Image (spheres, rainbow, N blue to C red):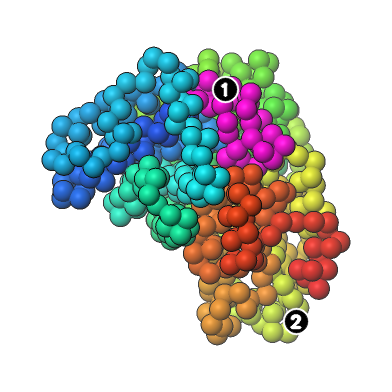
Amino acid sequence: MFCYQCQETFQNKGCTQAGVCGKKSDVALAQDLLIYVTKGISAVTTQLRAESKPVKSRVNHSITLNLFVTITNANFDRDAIFKRIEQTLKTKAKLLAVVDDKKNLPAAALWTDVAENFDVKAAQVGVLSTADEDVRSLRELITYGLKGLAAYMKHANRLGYDDDKINAFTQSTLAKLLDDNLSIGDLTALALEVGKFGVDTMALLDKANTETYGNPEVTKVKLGVGKNPAILISGHDLRDLEQLLEQTAGTGVDVYTHGEMLPAHYYPKLKKFPQLVGNYGNAWQMQTTEFEKFNGAILLTTNCLVPPKKSYANRVFTTGAVGFPNCKHIDEVDGKKDFSPLIELAKTLPAPTELETGEIVGGFAHEQVFAVADKVVDAVKSGAIKKFVVLAGCDGRQKSRQYYTDFAKALPKDTVILTCGCAKFRFIKLNLGDIGGIPRVLDAGQCNDSYSLALIALKLKEVFGLDDINKLPIVYSLSWVEQKACTVLLALLYLGVKNIHLGPTLPAFLSPNVAKVLVEQFGIGGISTVKDDLKNWIG
């Protein structure tokens, strides 16, 4: 195996024996094969569109799910991944039967079977099968950007929202990654185009979330626990939470959010359920201790899953793109999921062990910030607010991520932090105060809600009458782990944002030459020490 798609990859070079994330080598190889056959079917659907033939939404959604399945910390179940490979090949065979012009299709489009010698075949099509380091780097950057885009698209699809322009772009781009004739310049332009469609996809998801559940509201979320048996829901899928809340009504079972599910409390339609009682725990990497102490049933709706301990694995259920061997998986049937096994198990288990008390305040998505835009502008003009600092993205396991807590603590009291994603858990529970009634930490929601931060920046650019988004008093420091962060980065670059700082390390998949281009053209940089970064970024 060889995998370097996440920030935690071994020695910031690549995982070759097993993933730091916990996936075994056979799972990594199966994921490589799934990506390859997904590129193959995408070449076929792209040809069908070129022949003005329709591609059914079922096929589009299957391709989207294939990409989502391979995101870091999503699916560790080799058999489940192989079923997706086999289903993809069957679907592709049916599509090939109606393609008129097959002569220019790549080899991946003609593959029919991978059941035998799959490890050999995976090695032939994996990351290292691209010999040129710079071409490989750009191909992987594009692939990871598409994986993140697919995650956002899948959430929109679950709420009944779709866009065939985005589907067509995703598939045509996957097909182009099979073309050895594309130059470095072609691939660089394609990466920025992924950013453009990343913005479109995040806008679609924002529309899906807000039209379905209402615009997020400033909300105080409880951190303590009650005495009822309970279910803990983690991941990002709001539709799963909604169905779980509908099915737990009147059962006496409470529901708590974990990790990236915290922002569900901000949505008016979801917060009306009385059994949605609070948030339990912190970011994804804490789940091995927090899940054990929760005592109740646990539902993983999307990444980020850490391989569960035997002590609580029998209480873990997966759904959607998530999978782990021997964990019960709940499938969707006709748009609905039956969570009764989860609920019945929860009724037999003790109430959660309390981790902490207090509350978290969040819900500062774009509409909430727009509502106080005049107040924000006045605070900037008066000098009460000197800088906005975007501290957003992923949390992770390394001790070096303490940097983000220390940085937030050390920021001058005339700075406001804009955040989303699980990176917020590094500082959202600190009492950092406010500036004239404006909280110094404004949480826009999940990593899925990064679009809100982009809209806020564009709104500030508008109200200040600036001709360049980079003239705003905003510093961007993004922590990252997985591929949605790649999509967000490319989206920001497409929007013209420069001088973004990535940490705690730069991606291992960036070759020296590609990294040099990003530094020279976009000002991409890393992080150093809190003291030096405060001096250089804040002044």
Please tell me the numbered disc located at residue 25. Answer: 1
Label 1: state its secondary structure: helix
- In the rendered image, the quadrant that contains the C terminus is bottom right
Judge by depth and name the residue closer to the eye, 287 or 132.
132
Q: Residue at x 43, y 23 (%)?
A: 121
Among numbered discs 2 and 1, the one appearing first in the sequence: 1
The answer to whether marks 2 and 1 mark residues whose Cβ atoms lie closer than 8 Å is no
Label 2: state its secondary structure: loop
Viewer can see residue 138: yes
**How far across and down, in percent of the image, does residue 123 sit?**
49, 26
Residue annotated with mark 2: 383
Q: Is residue 489 left or right of residue 66?
A: right
**How far across and down, in percent of the image, does residue 2 sit?**
57, 31
Query: Mark 2 and mark 1: span between their CA atoms?
Result: 55 Å
Q: Is residue 5 magenta?
A: yes
Circle 2 Cα neighbour tier, 10 Å, few/some/many (<14 / 14–19 / ≥20): few
The residue mark sitting in front, 2 or 1, is 1
Judge by depth and name the residue closer to the eye, 258 or 116.
116
Q: Which residues are magenta?
A: 1-30
